[in-house]
Image (cartoon, rainbow, N blue to C red):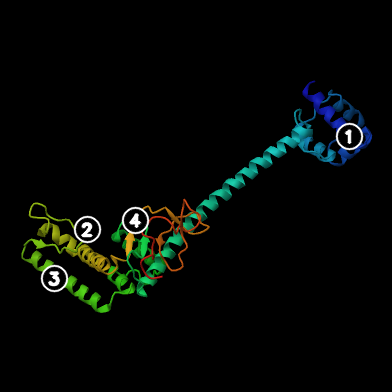
Amino acid sequence: MDVDRAIGKRIEARRIHREWSQEELSKRLREVGVNWSQVTLSKVEKGQRPVKLAETLPVSTVLGIEPLALVPGWGGLATLRARADQNLQQAMHRVHQTTSILNHARHELKGIRAKAELFHLCCELEEGRRGPRQYVVNCRNEKEFLELLDGTVQEFDRVDAGERDWLDLMEELGIGRSRIRNARAQISGDLNDANDQVTYRRAWEVPPYAIDIPRDTEWGEHLLQPPELEPILNNGRLQRALTCGMALSLFRREFGETIVFRAGDTKWFRAGDEEPLMVRGLKGDRSHPRSHHKPDTTADDTDETYPGKNGNG
């Protein structure tokens, strides 16, 4: 069957389905601008007169079908299949979008939860909560922890971010003001000494608490020659290195026995959650190992002490 004949048969079938005569359908078509007589309609249905492209839309509208339903291979179950496939594609696209949004929200939740745990830890330290291995923190070491804490504080408190340094963080963690003042005085003295050494073009002995400062290995690991010392002194890098190093030293002395740092500590989880904890051992901690769905009270602790077991709370 050729295309014109197939289209004509579809028009005829739809007309009969509507219980219209050829005269009635041709009258309805003339009302929407398709100037078909009953004779013309008869020729169309027999495939003797092709349907023009401009006539397709008004004819299908009068017949109550989609224009593609006139095309061979469409209509009936084929049309329903096409609609179902289209709906399926749209649904899959919505699922993909929703999954992307959900994954982003989960990632965001993980970050916010970790930051909240950091602040909870800081508040408990400031309150004086201590104990051997009281907390386990998911960081490599103290330096990484303080960098993370400093960035988190700046994110949540942008007003004072430019004025706060690591020694300010130490004070907020409960280290006494007198110790902070003494630390700043030592830093000031070391900076003055560095200035003097630059002035007299002499090597400067780098304080053992300084971090991230290049050292002249030719003259000894503890010495810094004027050409290397002067630029880092003038751009403030030396002061930052001494301040951060001093804060790191105070932190280790104050909390070294209280906090255990273990990067990649993905074993312990909050009840009902699939994300590992950033800080373990906080007040009310009900975390459990992944291999158990409840706190393990019988496991051997020779390899790892459960936070808080030997400490407060």
Give the mark, 4 or 1, whose residue is nearer the N terminus. 1
**Residue drawn at (90%, 32%), measured in percent from left and top?**
37
Circle 2 Cα neighbour tier, 10 Å, few/some/many (<14 / 14–19 / ≥20)? few
Per the image, label 2 sits on a secondary structure element best described as loop
Distance from disc 2 to disc 3, alpha carbons, whole Å, reads 19 Å
Looking at the image, tell me whether mark 3 or mark 1 is earlier in sequence order.
1
The residue tagged 4 is 302
Where residue 299 sits, quadrant-wise, is bottom left
Residue 313 rendering spot, x and y as whole percentages: 41, 70
First of labels 4, 2 by sequence position:
2
Name which of mark 2 and mark 3 comes first in the sequence. 3
Task: List the residue tagged with mark 2.
Answer: 212
- From this view, report whether residue 48 is shown above or below residue 81: above
Q: Which residue has dot 1 on it?
A: 15
Task: Using residue 115 as the reference point, say whether residue 8 is left or right of it.
Answer: right
Q: Residue furthest top?
A: 1
**Height in image: 179 above or below 237?**
below
Q: Amino acid at mark 1?
A: Arg
Dot in front, 4 or 1 = 4
Q: Residue at x 38, y 67 (%)?
A: 153
Amino acid carrying mark 4 in the image: Thr
Above or below, 299 against 73 in this view is below
**Marks 3 and 4, the one that precedes in the sequence:** 3
Q: Name the residue beneath numbered marker 3.
A: 192
Separation (CA) of disc 3 from disc 1? 101 Å
- In depth, the one of 30 and 303 nearer the eye is 303
From mark 4 to mark 2, how far is it between C-alphas?
36 Å
